[in-house]
Image: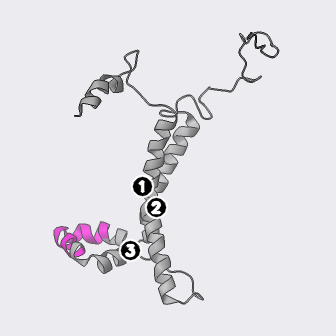
Amino acid sequence: MPKLLLHYWPEYLSGPDGQFFRPTGGTLMRGYTLLLTFLILPVLGALGHDIYITYQDQDFNKPMMFSDVGYLWTHYHPESYNWARSNFSPESWSYLVTFILEQKTMLVAGIPFAIAGIILLVLKLLGLPPFSGGGLMGGRFKKKGGFNFGSGDKKQGRMKYNRK
C-alpha cells in the first residue's frame, strides 16, 4: 500500500465513535451511478448494434429486428462458442444455455440493470441503508419555517450587521 493510504487507513475503517465508516451524500450516490452506468453499457451496445444492422439493410418499411444473444456469440466469436459448447454437458446446454441464447440481446443485457435499479429504488423508498433517514418511512422531515440563525423557539427578524 502506498504510504499516503496507510497514513489515512484507520480513518477509513472507523469513525470517531468507533463505528464502521459509511460515506454519506454524494460519495455514496456516485458509486451507485457508476454501477448503473456500467450495467447500462451492454444495453446501449446491443441497441447500437441493432440500429447499425437495420441501417445497413436500408429497409425502413419493416420494423427493426433485435438480435439474439446466440447470433451475436456465434457470428462475432465462434471460437469461444465452440469452446463453451464442448465444455458444457449436453443436458445443461440444452436446458439452460439454449434458453438464454434464444433470448433477445436487449432483454438479457437489460435484466441486471433493471434488477439493480429496482433494488435501489426500493431501498430509497423505504429509507433503508445506505439511504438511512430518507424515503417514505425514514422519519427525516423538513422543518417548517426555513433556516434561521436563532434558537428556533421564537421568530427573529433580520440579522443586523454591527461592524464599525
- Rounded to the nearest whole Å, what is the CA distance between mark 1 and mark 2? 11 Å
Q: Amino acid at mark 2?
A: Gly
Mark 2, other Cα within 10 Å: few <14 / some 14–19 / many ≥20 = some
Residue at label 3?
A: 102
Quadrant that contains the C terminus: top right
Q: Is residue 93 above or below residue 128?
A: below
Which quarter of the rendering shows the N terminus? top left
Q: Determine the CA span between mark 1 and mark 3.
A: 24 Å
67 and 99: which one is in front? 67
- In this figure, which residue is indicated by the disc labeled 2? 110
Above-or-below relation of 16 to 77: above
* Residue on which the image places disc 1: 38
Residue 83 sits inside the magenta stretch: yes
Decide if residue 26 is in sight here.
Answer: yes
Residue occupying the point 50% across, 80% down:
65
Q: Main secondary structure of the magenta part?
A: helix
Label 2, secondary structure: give it. helix
Q: Residues within 10 Å of mark 1 (few under 14, many from 20)?
A: few
Q: Position of residue 59 (x, y in %)?
A: 55, 90
Q: Which mark is residue 5?
A: none
Identify the coloring: one colour
The residue depicted at 35 percent of the width and 76 percent of the height is 72
Vertical comparison of 80 with 57: above or below: above
Residue range of the region highlighted in magenta in the rendering: 81-97
Query: With 12 as the anchor, is 66 left or right in this view?
Result: right
Task: Name the residue nearer the viewer: 41 or 160.
Answer: 160
- Tell me which amino acid carries mark 1: Phe
- Tell us which disc is closer to us: 1 or 3: 1
> At which x and y percent is residue 150?
72, 12
Q: Find the distance from the CA under tag 3 to the CA under tag 2.
A: 15 Å
Q: Position of residue 132 (x, y in %)?
A: 52, 30
